[in-house]
Image (cartoon, rainbow, N blue to C red):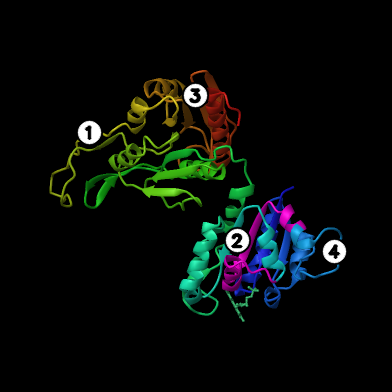
Amino acid sequence: MKNVLLIVTGSIAAYKAADLAHGFRKAGFNVNVIMTRNAAFFINPITFETLTGNKCVMDTFDRDFDFEVEHISLAKAADLCMVAPASADIIGKIANGIADDMASTTIMAVKCPKLIAPAMNTAMYENPIVQDNMKKLKSYGYEIIEPARGLLACGDEGKGKLPPVEELIECGLRHIGHIKDMAGKRVLITAGPTAERIDPVRFITNHSSGKMGYALADAAADRGAYVTLVSGRTALKAPLGVDRVDVFSASEMAEEVFKRQKDTDIFIFAAAVADFRPAEISKSKIKKKDGETPVIHLERTVDILETVGLKRTEKQYICGFAMETEDLIENAAKKLKKKNADMICANSLRDEGAGFISDTNRITLIKKDGNRELPFLSKRELSDLIFDEIVSDISQRTGVSS
Ligand SMILES: Cc1cc2nc3c(=O)[nH]c(=O)nc-3n(C[C@H](O)[C@H](O)[C@H](O)COP(=O)(O)O)c2cc1C
């Protein structure tokens, strides 16, 4: 079992650390909590002891220990160290090498990934000294988790809130929750619908929610990849650590993809890109006229998958998606060949709980060496199975097992 070392300091947000400790525990980690003496004004160590099943440590010179020097043994055992909430004080201490209590001394000895989640009043957070200290910590490899904006406990409005506990856990999982078998890989994923303008107020689009592409982006980021998500209009939030580029139309999506063609190792084309667009976009709103029904002439949009496939290198990996109402597998196999892709994920519009809006999907992987039907699962779970296949294909090509 992996160990999370949670360090809680004297911020009003300290009460949220109880949920954080509980969340890491629920996610399957052993959690040790160290509190500063000032944190104990905000929350009682017994809360953490009950939630984690481990002693909550505060005192460097506590003589009630079983084995090694406690700050060193906790530091050595940790697979991840998160300071949340991190006071301006602890940030200043770490940045300046001060180790005068259990929390700051242990951080000094920790070698695993260190994540700092500042939480404080906006004026404190914006203070150039605090900002400089955070810059310094970043330069030493500490990860600073950006605080959220909102109404602060002191009544001020601005940046400085501890982000929601789920986000903090997600940040932690990025480091220890998943095998990093895609570390360093540059992955470009398209997601969501494109929309084609008719006039300044109207456009043609489709039902894509973007959920499949966003789930893939989340999975790739969890496995250590650098992910660029070129996204059409969706209501979804970009997964943490993913670089999202918003686009509207198929041609904008194509432009953003082509720009990155050379610098991408793996392409996943999960967006529902329009095949046709109005041949002309009216500059003014098309008016209703008595007895007249306007006709919109359509023209083909650029085929992003095919264009990338034409210019691809041997090393690049291309995975497309196919969604059909008829002859899905046959059409997906044709698409694989025609577009020079490595894999097509065929998803049927006919299956219940699969396709556009749902959180689940049914996918068949189509490759040159055969087809493989994946189980009916959530889009997030399927994303991992898709990347398992991609990682295994890439390692077979290079002869390197991951
Ligand atoms: C009611 C109250 C709320 C506080 N909230 C914060 C806070 O959110 N962030 C912060 O950096 N300091 C906050 N402070 C100030 C710190 O508790 C103070 O700087 C303390 O020395 C930090 O100690 P520590 O870093 O050892 O925990 C607060 C103080 C009080 C009295």
Q: Kindly indicate the quadrant of the structure image that contains residue 294.
A: top left
**Nearest to N terminus: mark 4 or mark 1:** 4
Q: Are marks 2 and 4 in contact (CB under 8 Å)?
A: no
Q: Residues within 10 Å of mark 4 (few under 14, many from 20)?
A: few
Amino acid type, callout 1? Glu
**Percent position (x, y) of residue 198?**
22, 45
Which of discs 4 and 3 lies nearer the camera? The answer is 4
Q: Which residues are magenta?
A: 73-100
**Nearest to N terminus: mark 1 or mark 2:** 2
Q: Secondary structure at mark 1?
A: strand
**Nearest to N terminus: mark 3 or mark 2:** 2
Q: Is residue 88 left or right of residue 247?
A: right
**Nearest to N terminus: mark 4 or mark 3:** 4
Q: Are marks 1 and 3 in contact (CB under 8 Å)?
A: no
Q: Which residue is painted at 78% across and 64% down in the image?
A: 50
Looking at the image, residue 105 lies above or below residue 240: below
**Nearest to N terminus: mark 1 or mark 3:** 1
The residue beneath circle 3 is 366
Q: Kindly indicate the quadrant of the structure image that contains residue 400.
A: top right
Residue 74 shown in magenta: yes
Distance from the alpha carbon under mark 3 to that under mark 2: 39 Å
Q: Which mark is residue 165?
A: 2
**Percent position (x, y) of residue 124?**
50, 75
Residue 285 shown in magenta: no
Q: Which mark is residue 299?
A: 1
Distance from the alpha carbon under mark 4 to that under mark 1: 75 Å
Q: Which residue is painted at 62% across and 40% down in the image?
A: 179
Q: Residues within 10 Å of mark 2 (few under 14, many from 20)?
A: some
